[in-house]
Amino acid sequence: MEDFLWWRDGVIYQVYPRSFVDSNGDGFGDLRGIIAKLDYLAFLRIDGLWLSPIYPSPDKDFGYDVADHTAVDPRYGTMEDFDTLVAEAHKRGIRVILDMVLNHTSDQHPWFVESRSSREDPKRDWYLWQEGPNNWASVFGGSGWVYDEATGQYYFHMFLKEQPDLNWQNPEVRQAQLEVFRFWLERGVDGFRLDVFNAYFKHPGFEDNPSRFGLRRFDRQIHVNDMDRPEMMPLLGELRSLLDSYLERYSVGEPFMPTIEKTAHYAGEGKLHTAFHFFYDDMSLIPKWGANHFRRQMLELGKASGGVYLPALAMNNHDSTRTASRYCRGEDDANARIAMALLLTVRGTPFIYYGEEIGMRNISLSRKEIMDPVGRYYWPVIKGRDGCRAPMQWNDSPQAGFSTGKPWLKLHPDYTKRNVAAQENDASSMLNFTRRLIALRKEYRALRDGGIIFLEPPQKDVLAYLRLSPKGTILVGLNFSNKSRKLDLPPGDWQPLLTTHGRDVNISSEMELAPNEVSLLKSS
Ligand code: NOJ
């Protein structure tokens, strides 16, 4: 493929390691398990693999409370396993992206243990210690400050109290963190996903946040002093120079409290390669769905990015409701297919969350089964994130082929029918649909880095756009309605490339999209 750059033109797949494959029967996914499934990812034609945290962790926030940034948690395997994973992935043309959780550490991290030991400790200032709390809150509930009896001061935590925030204003912290990147770069890691990177820096004078209307304490503040601080920008420059001193390395930021403007602010030359745009807002009670909803986001993203960077796009991840649970009714995958087609054909780098390609649904949990600290604190208003973290459904054998032991989290009961093995053998499955779309991205440059023009279909339920390249144009038509809809085609010799509704004739100036149809046409 001409000029193919993996992080710009490729498709990235997120693995939540504890839920992907368990190779040793302890019920917990591991690195050897992931290695065993690299051929599956190659079959899907994935270009990059993002691993949610694999570091030692007391697991208060399921790995996002890191106790050592440069080691592998023994439950996942060894550093040797990790090196094998990188080597085997590279053999298949798959790049490896690590999750860097650097806003905070676990309270068990040696840095915090030292910092907490006395006011005079050299690492005291590596965290945010104060005589008294200000109004900053924890997004996981309550005040963000905890009183530490032993030394008589408070420390700040944006997330759990077991996740104290680092003091990035301290140059030693900055240096130590850049060393963490260097450590993994030297091991051949290709890229990094930066967890809540825009919260690294806090107001140096600890000023209160202004108030506003909101439900949770955290939402009743305008977060100008505990995130999105201007001090962030030079750090991004420094990080980018470090990454650029290696070949084809990549960074993708997870903006905390994301907006399109934030994504644009932090990505581009001398900054991060890109930042996420999430197509959904999990806090809205009724999920928004429809042609206009997505068209508006893409137009705003296009304007904000101004061609300077390509947004990283996601329909779901380990913090959100699964796409199919958000948009589909029962076992009908029609809307999940529309969402997948959109993700893989608009302008941006698509991220697929494990299981999304087979239309996995959230599991439901009773109150006593909830493990996620967010769900425990806010139940029943917010039920937490366990629902989207269930074991991958590989086949219909006991434990879905995920493990030979008892899985750490329960399986979705639909696994006996909805699984990779069943869908591999079904030409019309969601899996084969996804695979075909990825293959088309590889085949047609227009779908990877072509310009995008949105059409104005006569009926509002249709989202239609052209992807343009000097070698040809692709038209994507998505019918969000469960009724047939008309689509006027621009002049061209349109031939079907892929459709959910079997079409084999050439199409002239007008076409009728079947209910919920996805159609890709090409014109040379
Ligand atoms: C964002 C991560 O995606 C989420 O899972 C985690 O709880 C918080 N950051 C804190 O690290």
Image (spheres, rainbow, N blue to C red):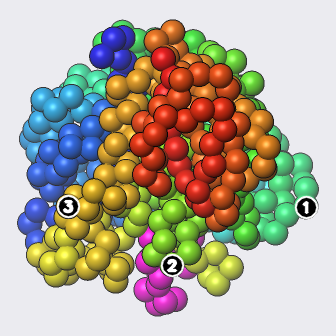
Inspect the image, locate mark 3, and give the three-letter code of the amino acid beneath it. Asn
Q: Nearest the camera: 115 or 214?
A: 214
Kindly state the secondary structure of the residue where label 1 is placed.
loop
- Residue marked by disc 3: 425
Q: Residues within 10 Å of mark 2 (few under 14, many from 20)?
A: few
Amino acid type shown at disc 2: Gly
Q: Nearer the viewer, mark 2 or mark 3?
A: 3
Per the image, label 2 sits on a secondary structure element best described as loop
Marks 3 and 1, how far apart in space?
A: 52 Å
Query: Rounded to the nearest whole Å, what is the CA distance between mark 2 and mark 3?
Result: 22 Å
Structural crowding at the residue carrying mark 1, measured as other residues with C-alpha within 10 Å and reported as few (<14), some (14–19) or many (≥20): few
Q: Earlier in the sequence, mark 3 or mark 1?
A: 1
**Residue 365 counted in the magenta span:** yes
Residue 124 is situated, as x and y percent measured from the top left of the image, at 52, 42
- The Cα–Cα distance between marks 1 and 2, rounded to whole angstroms, is 36 Å
**Quadrant location of residue 379?**
bottom right
User: What residue sits right under mark 2 in the picture?
Assistant: 330
Between 1 and 240, the one lying in front of the other is: 1
Residue matched to label 1: 213
How many tags in the picture? 3
Q: Is residue 203 above or below residue 281?
A: above
Q: Whole-percent x and y of residue 461? A: 73, 53
Q: What segment carries the magenta color?
A: 361-376
- Does any portion of residue 309 appear in the rendered image? no
Packing grade of label 3 (10 A; few <14, some 14-19, many >=20) is few
